[in-house]
Amino acid sequence: MHTRNFDALIIGGGIIGLVTAWRAAQRGVRTALADPEPGGGAARVAAGMLAAVTELQYGEQTLLELNSASAARYPDFVAELTDLTGLDTGYRPCGTLTVALDADDRAHLRDLHAFQTSLGLRTQWLSGRECRRLEPLLAPGVRGGLRVDGDHQVDPRRLAGALLRAAELAGVVFLRSAVARVTVTAGRATGALLADGREIAAASTVLAAGSESGRIAGVPEDVAPPVRPVKGQILRLRIPPTHAPFLSRTVRAVVRGSHVYLVPRENGELVLGATSEEFGWDTTVTAGGVYELLRDAHELVPGITELPLTEMLAGLRPGSPDNAPLLGPTALDGLLLATGHHRNGVLLTPVTGDVMAEVLTSGELPDYARPFAASRFDRPAAAARLEQTV
Ligand code: GLY
């Protein structure tokens, strides 16, 4: 069969694969993207919070820098996408309020506030009464909260649609097939054999298949990314006009150790998430998952029980060993990664596109992305492979 040649082959058509393909093609890289259903993946499930400050974890200051850089790029990023495609991404600069429902939560949020402030982040402590003044439907027992006016939201499904169109307009070739295996010839990745039998040759092959990225056939074990699936179950409800405005911003809490968040969209959708479960490649929606989400959300905003429930879904976050993405070249020549974004895939979409386009054109990660180099988890055989090449 005839082999098609490209500069770059992107494996995976979720938002990370799409943004990589789009940005690369914009820079003149002849790019193909392989996915049976581009525009799908975890973004179909994700709530789309852009929560660089709210989701900050202790010890993740380096990741915070990348998250904040990506959040800062969002307004121009979505404006560019909409200008090019005519499609709206549902970007909503609405802010976020995280509340405490009991004394333990309050102490924890107080500590988090001190930590955020020590890093110079813009965040404001509110009393329970101030929280309810902002969001009148909050439970009467709310004990205080953190207001973060810079943490916004986007609609990941619309974002995926706009990215897909932008990539088409930029000349990305969509290969609507799964990948049977990555091809490795004479010690370098050379493209892929598709499940439909087509052979694709590429100077660079990028694994951008989310949690699947670590188990694509043909990739040598020592360079396969150490990503694992972290299941998130999520619900969608509808806010009838009679109940609007329901919430004016994203509202969230930690209830009995689990994160619960309510993300109100301008189109009347209310996204309620999310569980975090490590059970392999299972995307079953369970009675227990739905029960826990509704129970916790009801403690936060009792009025949710009046809303129509329109969708229940589960998706898989690509978890990495340090919760940060793996970007750029691997120890195998010609093989690159754009995966491992864990809880921050939507947030990190703009910066990932820029980083990967830079790598695909110059061969180098930009300085600000070096802490996220794919090579940081190199295993012994991969390290030996690298030594042979220098
Ligand atoms: N960033 C939200 C989540 O992963 O559930």
Image (tube, helix red, strand yellow):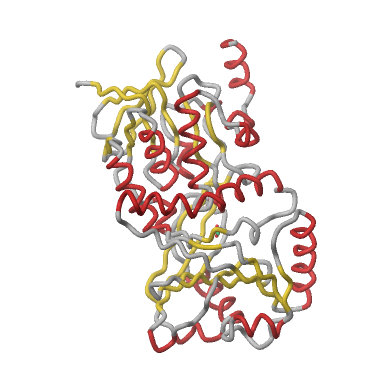
Q: Can you tell which quarter of the image residue 205 is in?
A: top left
Q: Residue 108, percent across and down? A: 77, 67
Q: Residue 55, percent across and down? A: 64, 59
Of the pair 160 and 119, the residue shown nearer to us: 119
**Quadrant location, ligand no. 1:** bottom right
Of the pair 177 and 243, the residue shown nearer to us: 243
In this image, 278 relative to 184: left or right?
right
Pick the quarter of the image with the N terminus: top left
Reply above or below: 369 against 148.
above
Q: Residue furthest left?
A: 1
Q: Which residue is at a point 54% across and 72% down the rendered structure image?
A: 249
Of the pair 171 and 43, the residue shown nearer to us: 171
Q: Residue 151, percent across and down? A: 59, 62
Pick the quarter of the image with the C terminus: top right
Q: Which residue is at a point 52% across and 49% down the rendered structure image?
A: 73
Q: Residue 298, percent across and down? A: 56, 81
In this image, 131 relative to 16: left or right?
right
